[in-house]
Image (cartoon, rainbow, N blue to C red):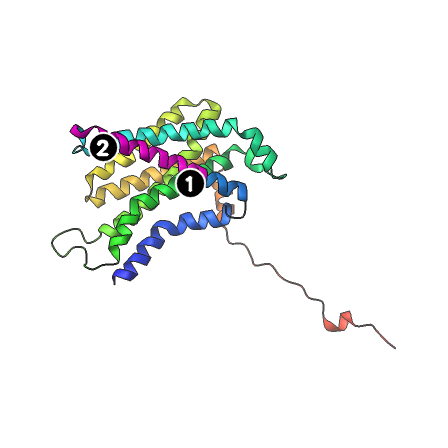
Amino acid sequence: MTLAQFFGCGLLAFGPPLAMFSITIARDPIRTIMLVASAFFWLLALLLSSILYVAVTQLQDTLVFGLVFSVLFQELFRFLWFLLIQKAEGGLKKVSDGNMQIVENKHILAYVSGLGFGIISGAFSLVNVLADMTGPGTMGLKGDPGNFFVASAVTSLAFTLLHVFWGVLFFNALHRRAYLQLAYVILCHFIASGITLMNPMYGVTIPTVWVLTLLSGGLALVVAGGSHTTLAAALRPRPPPVLQVPSESASQDTRL
C-alpha cells in the first residue's frame, strides 16, 4: 500500500509538469538549458533563505519569518534571472541555430523560466514526503490526518503551476512596466504560501491555493494573447492522421 501511495502521489505532483516539459521543452536544447538555469536561480534563493534562517536564531521558531523572506528571495531571484536573460539576449540569438522563436516571443522564455522554478520548488517541497511514503508505517494511526500525503502532492502541483503562471505574469509586467501586475504576483505568492500555515486545515488551504492557481492561470492566458477560443481549440481532440497507401493494382503496370 505504501509503495502504491508513493507512485500515486508522485505522479499526481510531477506528472503534469513532466508532461509539460516533455511536450514543450525537451526537444529544444536551448529551452532545456534555460529551464535548468532558472531552476539554479531558485536554488540560490533557497540558499539565501536558509542562511538568513540559520543566522537569525531568535526567530527560528517563527515560521512566518522564514516564509516572508523565502518569498521575497524567490521573487528577487526571479527578477535577477530576468535581468540576466535581457543581458544575454544577443548570445541567445547566436546559439539559437535559426530558431528565433524563444528570443522573439518573450512569453515562451517566461514560461520556460517559470516551469524551471516550479519543478525545482515542487521537488524540494515533496521529496522528503515521498521518501516517507514508502514506509514503514501508515499516516493517521494516532489521530494524524490520513490525507497528509495526498494533500501535500496536490499542493505541490498547485505551486508548480503557480510558478509557471507567475513567471509569465512577472516577465510581462517587467516588459510592459505594468507594476500592478507585478504587485499581484508578489501578493499572490505571499497569500498562497501564507495560507499553507493553516495546515492541516486542508478544506481551507487546498481550495484557496487552487483558486489562486486558476486565477493566475487565467491572467497568464490573457497576457500571453490567449482567449477562451484558442484554449478550446488547443483542448479539442484532433483526428488521427490518415495514412494513404496506393493500392497494389494501381502501382502495377497495365499490360494488354
Image coordinates of residue 256 in percent, x first then y, are 88, 77
Q: Amino acid at mark 2?
A: Val
**In the image, is 134 to the left or to the right of 89?**
left
Image coordinates of residue 249 in percent, x first then y, are 76, 73
Residue 45 falls in image quadrant = top left
Q: Tell whether position 41 is magenta.
A: yes
Residue reaching furthest to the right: 256
**Which residue lies at the image location 20% right of the left edge and 34% below the top edge?**
63
Image coordinates of residue 62 in percent, x first then y, are 17, 32
Q: Which residue is mark 2?
A: 54
Q: Nearer the viewer, residue 120 or 24?
A: 120
**Which residue lies at the image location 62% right of the left edge and 39% below the top edge?**
97
Q: Which residue is mark 1?
A: 116
The disc, 2 or 1, on the residue closer to the chain's N-terminal end is 2
**Which residue lies at the image location 38% right of the left edge and 30% below the top edge?**
77
Is residue 69 among the parts visible in the rendering?
yes
Query: What is the span of residues highlighted in magenta in the rendered image?
Result: 37-58
* Depicted 64 relative to depicted 179: above or below: below
Estimate how packed mark 2 is, as few (under 14), some (14 to 19) or many (20 or more) residues with alpha carbons within 10 Å.
Answer: few
Residue 59 falls in image quadrant = top left
